[in-house]
């Protein structure tokens, strides 16, 4: 059953993302062959062969095939992904000086579809318990320090009143406000002024540590004794900060996690230590950690981030520019058999060259988007996105549209000469309703449609659509919740402009990373490049934003 949304992750993630992850703004577009990495399984010969085929077909530069050493199969253990996949891909990119060049990773036949849920060892369970204990103790210390500094701030400024809130983010803001008030206090007596300054820096030493003080304050502004200590230990503090940064990339190693806790506690104070503990706690939690291989791979460069459920996709057009985990695009070139992958690549190239032709088939269910059924993530809401798409196409294009708004799924052999399909809802029971033209694109909204792709008796829609000639589709590797699918009235209109590649269309419209959905198809495929079906200026205003140059913000 395709479920509607429930809560994802704690609001404190915002602080974790801000302080602990590799961060960046929305990346620039458009995608080209020089920005692509091809990822294969060195233990599956066809994986490498298909990558070579695609490399030649799309003129991907030499030195862009990364072969990783993992077992075959459609599921990979969590620990294998962390220890054998992530470091190997990072090292390949770093060694080949591709760290900043690669914007999209293409995975191939032979790589797993799904990362299994974390199965923590007894030692990891013990570590998680200890981290929880340290979290509680650290939060108590922070509350006490905030309260003490706020009392001092109120003493120096009678109009100072603490803001409400007792979670970590609000405590950090309260302490910062109190520190600012104390720092701005006018004290005539020199000895009292020195005493007040020392109290402020004593608090800063506890809350942000010597590393934080070095980053936040200029040395001449510090009290003489503290300035001398920092000058004496400057190199040691900087070395500790640099080591801590490196250790964030070794999140899967328990000794590295322990060493990182020690360094942050010593050099970066209670606030950063609390953030680290929350990040490690979220990383170690086993619940709801199953994910699509590709959807997790988008966060290749991230340090610690919560693995339970999903994170918002910062490439999505509705996510405002800002600081987020560095996020790559991904796409998968895979099919029930290797030859079908070659067929998909070639059919896409031909359709791109000649222009994709054929009718649009839309199969909504007649669920009115009214009352509760109009809310985001409900059946009525998604059904309306298909009806919206039909209206856009009729109003703004000359495409032939067949739209069925009845509850039942279209019957077999309903439509011929089909270029685009979108419909629902038949869970893992593919219905061959369409005869597809070469280069067709389509997806079916339902759960578990990519649980398997290679099983001989697979009945899901991803395998069925590919076998019947679709060259680009998408689907979930487990229960995804309805709101994880790209909206029909966003994905397809962007595709019809012919201005964006398949990967860009998908990543501008898919809502989440670290979750269940996978895009299958050539990421560079642009089916309406030759004959755009809709003008950018005819799109709804929110979709036009997909073509604006994104604002840039330097990483902190």
Image: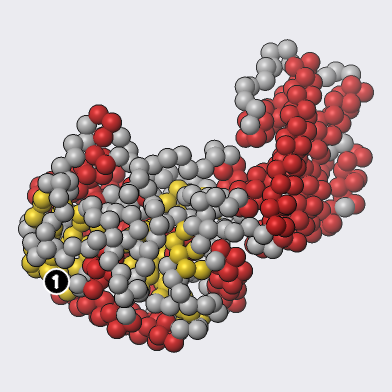
Q: Is residue 416 above or below residue 509?
A: below
226 sits to left or right of 257: right
The residue closer to the viewer here, 346 or 292, is 292
353 sits to left or right of 21: left
**What residue is drawn where x is 22% and y is 31%?**
370
* SS state under label 1: strand
Quarter of the image where one finds residue 519: bottom left
**What residue is drawn where x is 23% and y is 73%?**
467
Kindly identify which residue carries mark 1.
437
The residue closer to the viewer here, 249 or 456, is 456
Q: Position of residue 165 (x, y in %)?
A: 62, 25
The residue closer to the viewer here, 70 or 495, is 70
Badge 1: few (under 14), some or many (20 or more) residues near its Cα, within 10 Å?
many
Q: Position of residue 197 (x, y in %)?
A: 84, 29
Q: Position of residue 19 (x, y in %)?
A: 63, 47
Let me know if residue 221 appears in the view. Answer: no
**What residue is drawn where x is 40% and y is 76%?**
108
**What residue is drawn where x is 65% and y is 48%?**
281
């Amino acid at each position: 059953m395709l479920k509607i949304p429930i809560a994802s992750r704690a609001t404190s993630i915002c602080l974790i993302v801000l302080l602990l992850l590799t961060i960046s703004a929305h990346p620039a577009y458009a995608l080209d062959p020089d920005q692509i990495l091809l990822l294969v399984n060195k233990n599956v010969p066809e994986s490498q062969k298909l990558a070579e085929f695609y490399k030649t077909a799309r003129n991907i530069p030499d030195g862009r095939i990364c072969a990783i050493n993992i077992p075959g199969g459609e599921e990979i253990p969590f620990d294998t992904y962390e220890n054998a996949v992530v470091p190997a891909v990072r090292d390949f990119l770093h060694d080949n000086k591709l760290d900043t060049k690669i914007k999209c990773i293409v995975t191939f036949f032979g790589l797993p579809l799904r990362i299994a849920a974390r199965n923590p060892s007894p030692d990891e369970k013990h570590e998680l318990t200890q981290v929880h204990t340290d979290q509680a103790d650290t939060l108590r210390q922070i509350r006490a320090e905030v309260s003490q500094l706020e009392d001092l701030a109120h003493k120096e400024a009678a109009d100072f009143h603490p803001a409400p809130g007792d979670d970590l983010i609000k405590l950090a803001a309260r302490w910062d406000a109190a520190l600012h008030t104390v720092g701005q206090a006018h004290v005539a007596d020199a000895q009292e002024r020195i005493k007040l300054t020392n109290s402020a820096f004593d608090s800063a030493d506890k809350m942000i540590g010597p590393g934080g003080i070095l980053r936040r304050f200029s040395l001449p502004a510090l009290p003489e004794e503290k300035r001398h200590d920092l000058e004496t230990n400057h190199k040691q503090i900087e070395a500790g900060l640099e080591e801590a940064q490196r250790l964030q990339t070794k999140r899967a190693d328990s000794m590295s996690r322990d060493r990182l806790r020690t360094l942050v506690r010593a050099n970066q104070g209670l606030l950063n230590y609390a953030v680290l503990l929350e990040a490690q706690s979220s990383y170690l939690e086993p619940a709801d950690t199953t994910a699509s291989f590709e959807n997790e791979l988008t966060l290749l460069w991230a340090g610690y981030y919560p693995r339970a459920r999903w994170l918002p996709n910062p490439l999505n057009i509705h996510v405002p520019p800002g600081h987020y985990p560095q996020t790559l695009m991904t796409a998968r070139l895979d099919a029930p058999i290797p030859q079908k992958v070659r067929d998909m690549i070639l059919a896409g190239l031909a359709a791109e060259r000649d222009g994709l032709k054929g009718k649009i088939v839309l199969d909504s269910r007649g669920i009115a988007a009214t009352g509760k059924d109009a809310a985001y993530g409900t059946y009525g809401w998604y059904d309306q996105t298909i009806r919206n798409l039909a209206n856009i196409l009729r109003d703004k294009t000359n495409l032939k549209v067949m739209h069925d708004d009845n509850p039942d799924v279209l019957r077999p052999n309903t439509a011929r000469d089909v270029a685009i399909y979108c419909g629902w809802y038949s869970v893992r029971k593919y219905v061959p309703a369409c005869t597809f033209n070469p280069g067709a694109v389509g997806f079916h909204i339902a759960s578990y449609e990519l649980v398997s792709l290679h099983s001989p008796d697979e009945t899901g829609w991803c395998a069925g659509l590919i076998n019947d000639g679709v060259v680009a589709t998408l689907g979930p590797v487990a229960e995804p919740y309805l709101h994880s699918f790209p909206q029909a009235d966003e994905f397809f209109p962007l595709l019809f402009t012919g201005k964006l590649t398949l990967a860009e269309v998908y990543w501008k419209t898919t809502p989440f990373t670290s979750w269940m959905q996978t895009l299958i198809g050539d990421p560079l495929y642009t089916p309406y490049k030759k004959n755009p079906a809709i003008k950018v200026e005819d799109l709804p205003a929110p979709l036009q934003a997909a073509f604006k140059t994104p604002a840039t913000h330097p990483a902190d």
